[in-house]
Every structure is written in C-alpha cells, then in structure tokens.
Image: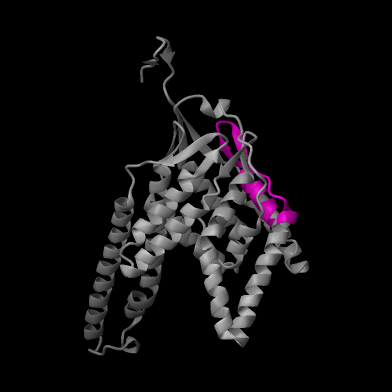
Amino acid sequence: MNDQITADGLPQPAATTEALSFSGSAGEYFRIWIVNLCLTIVTLGIYSPWAKVRRNKYLYGHSHLAGASFDYHANPVAILKGRLIAVGMLALYLVSAALVPVFSLAIGALIALAVPWLLVRSRMFAMRNTSYRNVRFRFRPVYAQAYKVIVGYLLLTIITLGIAYPWARYQRSKLIVDNTSYGTLDMQLDEEVGGSNFFVIYTGAGFLALIVGLVMAFALGMGASMFGGAGSLEDVPFIGMFLSVVFPILFYLALYFGTEAAIQRLILRSTAIASNQLQCSWNLPGISLIYLTNLFAIALSFGLLIPWATIRLQRYKLAGLALTLGSDELDAVVAAQTEEVSALGDEIGEAFDYDFGL
C-alpha cells in the first residue's frame, strides 16, 4: 500500500497491523492453579482473592501486543472486602429464602434493581486494574445510562416475548464499549453495527436449532417404525439413544458456543480505539469445537484439565485478534487519572452469578 500524503505535504506511513499472542503454558498455569485451589480450600475461601490476582496476573502477563504485555493490578485485600460483603448478601438471601420466602423476594428485587449499578462498578474495577505499557484502562461511571439500557431493554424484551433480546444485547455491548477508554483514547463500537446484526445471528441460530430439531424428530419417528413401530425410547436401539440424547446435547452446546462466539467476533471486529481498529478472525466451527472439547475434557478429568482448557482457549482467542494502528497514538497516549474503584461491584456480581461481559 502506498503512503498517503498529509495536509502539510509529508508522507503518512501506511497503517500497520499488530497481532496479539499468548505465551503461557498449561504446565506453568497448572502449578499456579493447583496451589490456588489448595490454599483456597485450606483457608475456607479466604485465599480466593489472592488466587484471583495470581491467576489474572499470569494470564494478562502472557498476553502480548506489539512487543509488550498486559498487566493486572487489583489489590487482593480490596477484593476480599468486597467478596465478604457479597457472600454475606448471598447468605442473607439464601437464609431468607428458606425461612421467610417473602423477604427473599424483596432482597432479590433489590439485587435485580442494583444490576445496572453493579455492571458499572464491575467494569470500572476491572478496567482500572488492567494496564498495557503502564497505561490503565478505564470505564466511565455512566449509572443513569446503564439503568436506561439494562432496565429499559429488559422490559422491552419481556413485553415482546423475547423478540427484542438481540437489540437489548446490542445496547448492552454498545454501553460497555463506548464508555471504555485506554488512557485518554476512547473506544467506540462502529455505528454501522446495530441491533439488526445481532438479530440476524440469533435468528439464524434459532432457525438452525428448529430445523435440526425437526430432522431429529423425523429420524426418531422413522427409527421407531423400523424397529417394531413402537414410539417409546426403550424400543429403539442405540441409534435412537444417540439421536434423542447424545446428538442433541452435542449439537445445542456447539450451537450455543458458536452463537456467542459470533456475537463476540462481531463486537470485536467493530470496535476501534481512537483511530486504531480491532480485527478478529475466529473460525466459528473451530472455536465451538474448542469450547465443546474443553467442556468434556474438564468433566472427564474431574476438573484437573481446567488449566489446560483455559490456556488452550486463551491461546486460540488471542491468536485470532489483531490491532490495525491508524497512527502512533498508542505510543503517545497519556494515562488519564482515574479514581480508585471499590471491588464491591465486581465481587457482588460474581457471588450472584451476573454476567457483565460484552
């Protein structure tokens, strides 16, 4: 590609693309993981914040871009404080659910109303404690916008019986991307990416699930006729068990993983950091197979292959990511000053299993 000419008549270097990579190994990560697990069990969970920091520092520190790695800076003590409060709230909810169900409904409603606040606090904490080249990421405290997006589109999804869910997912992703910054460089989701793109992916997945379900039902009916005309599963040999149990589980798990990967790929491809554009080349069948085989490997090994599965997935994801640099802004950026953010939002989210991802 030829160099372009700038306004002052000087040649402007062509854009370059920097690929991300991961250098961690399953053996190294296994040692960290097994020590974290043992210490967490021995200390009845008290060590878990330190385990989280050690895990993230390893994964971030072995994630590379343009010759530099990322870093994680969270204070384990801060995480422990937030986690204790979160666990206390969860315990209160469970006890009240067993003793006074009406009271548990009130607590659950309060937690649900707090979800937008938790999302913002969680993202602020996660970004504030992530850095690249000693420059921190940050997330703006957009509480009002979060309530508008999360609560508003949740109601719309309920009213439309789920039809509006793709637009709700898009708005949540846009909320997260557009309010994230790397130092003073703002991130932005391409305006051409809208809820319709999400709708196409989810509709396609739903249509495929319906077609495969009908085909399986037809195959089971034919199988039952061929083997005695009985419609019960007991009268259908191995092929019936495979079609009615094994194949549906494998197919719908793969479809779920593939759909989520397609959404993530769409978001990443459409995200820019100032004039620097993210690229994502994940192969959907390939990443679905990785998710699926990781799941079975973990189950068959009773959890001992979690480190291997984690490293395998991390390596594949980063190998498919790149950043096209539109200028030298990444080298010239000045870190924005941000406030220290409490870990409470992040840990409450974990305790109640809320998903604050894209």
Spot occupied by residue 341 in the image (x, y as percentages of width and height): 65, 50
Total numbered labels placed on residues in the image: 0
Which contiguous range is marked in magenta? 51-78
Residue 251 appears in the rendering? no
Residue occupying image coordinates x 25% and y 84%? 224
Spot occupied by residue 306 in the image (x, y as percentages of width and height): 59, 60
Outermost residue toward the front in this view = 144
Looking at this view, is 90 or 100 the one in front?
A: 100
Quarter of image, res 52: bottom right
Spot occupied by residue 346 in the image (x, y as percentages of width and height): 61, 57
What's the colour scheme?
Answer: one colour
Looking at this view, is 95 or 205 the one in front?
A: 95
Residue 39 appears in the rendering? yes
Residue occupying image coordinates x 52% and y 34%? 185
The image shows residue 102, relative to residue 199, as above or below, that is: below
Looking at this view, is 319 or 18 the one in front?
A: 18
Outermost residue toward the top in this view = 9
Spot occupied by residue 245 in the image (x, y as percentages of width and height): 38, 76
Answer with left or right where residue 265 lies relative to residue 101.
left
Quarter of image, res 205: bottom left
Quadrant showing the N terminus: top left
Is residue 261 magenta-colored?
Answer: no
Answer with left or right where residue 203 lies relative to residue 340.
left
Is residue 56 magenta-colored?
Answer: yes
The image shows residue 245, relative to residue 142, as above or below, that is: below
